[in-house]
Image (cartoon, helix red, strand yellow):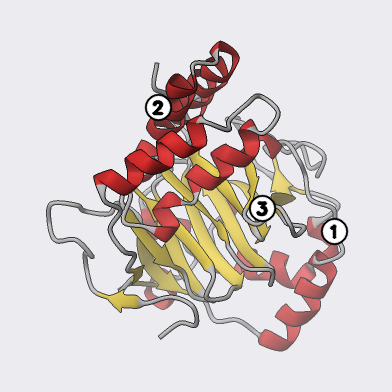
Amino acid sequence: MLASLQTTKRPCPHGTDKPIHSKKIGRVELDFAKLAIALAIIDYMSGNNAYDRYNLTVDPRKSGTWGQIILRNWSGKASDGLSKEFDGHSKWTEEGDKVPYIRDLVETTFDCEHLKSVRIFLANNAIIAAHRDYMEFKKGFRRLHIPLRTNGNSMNSEGSVVYHMEVGGIYYLDGREAHAGGNLGAESRLHLVLDFCPDQPVASLFQRPERNLAVGEMDFVARPALSDVDLDNLIDGLAGVISPRNYGTVVGLINLLPFTNDFDTAAVYEVVLDVAVRSGKSDVIELARADRRDFLGFE
């Protein structure tokens, strides 16, 4: 049992009517002494803010951030933080060169022929807003997560399912589904995130698939139901106070719903729009419609 969370290991937390596309596909053996040195170096790196619009602080009374550190990408420069479809091979950045253990781990575990980027996703007291990935791309990527440091307050969501990822596990995340993730606590969470060409079979991404590939059980997180009455009261209350000045804070609160309650990630910006419409403020409604379109692709 993970601290702070009630978890259940089973194939699907809600039965076959609510399948989850993301899955645990294997494990990587970590040298924890070398990993500790690498993480200590990463702790002093500056995050890239290319996706800062997605960054939502959980508790505004405390400092916190969701961000990324670019270790390998299309240009070989850590300042190029936006994902990009491109032909050819990716290159290690100056930040990637500072963590030789991570470089070695990637190059000995994976076939880098089709590797397009390597990043560290970091989070403490922050989540990434509900969204769908790859909407701006023709193909997108096949994305794998490997937690390097985590805690019981770190969670990811897909649809109405929430799960926790364990250190050393290899997880495939289907970014085309509505999802979110982050860390509700102050202790930092660090994930190694790799993007590959999407049309390659999973086994071909590994140097030795027989060593690393093995479908595992997910640690699903149980949350209490949110009644229609409670949701309606929440919408009414937030509609009475929302404004362009505090819009981000209100949106951050609503984005927590999938993690605190049995609530669908794709419905987050429906609630944001409901709050905006009930407020009667045209400028807030415009912000809500833009977020709904940009994050989830809904007009």
Is any atom of residue 283 visible in this view?
A: yes
Q: Which residue is mark 1?
A: 45
Q: CA distance from mark 3 to mark 1?
A: 12 Å
- The residue type indicated by label 1 comes to Met
- Tag in front: 1 or 2: 2
- The residue type indicated by label 3 comes to Arg
Q: Position of residue 228 (x, y in %)?
A: 25, 44
- Tag in front: 3 or 2: 2
Residue visible at 38% across and 44% down in the picture? 265
> Is 229 on the left or on the right of 233, as rendered?
left
- The residue type indicated by label 2 comes to Asp
Q: Is residue 48 above or below residue 41?
A: above
Is any atom of residue 177 visible in this view?
A: no
Q: Which residue is mark 3?
A: 119
Which numbered circle lies on residue 274? 2
Residue visible at 63% across and 26% down in the picture? 243
Q: Is residue 21 above or below residue 296?
A: below
Q: Position of residue 226 (x, y in %)?
A: 30, 53
Instruction: Quadrant for the C terminus, please.
Output: top left
Task: Assign a secondary structure to mark 1.
Answer: loop
Task: Assign a secondary structure to mark 2.
Answer: helix
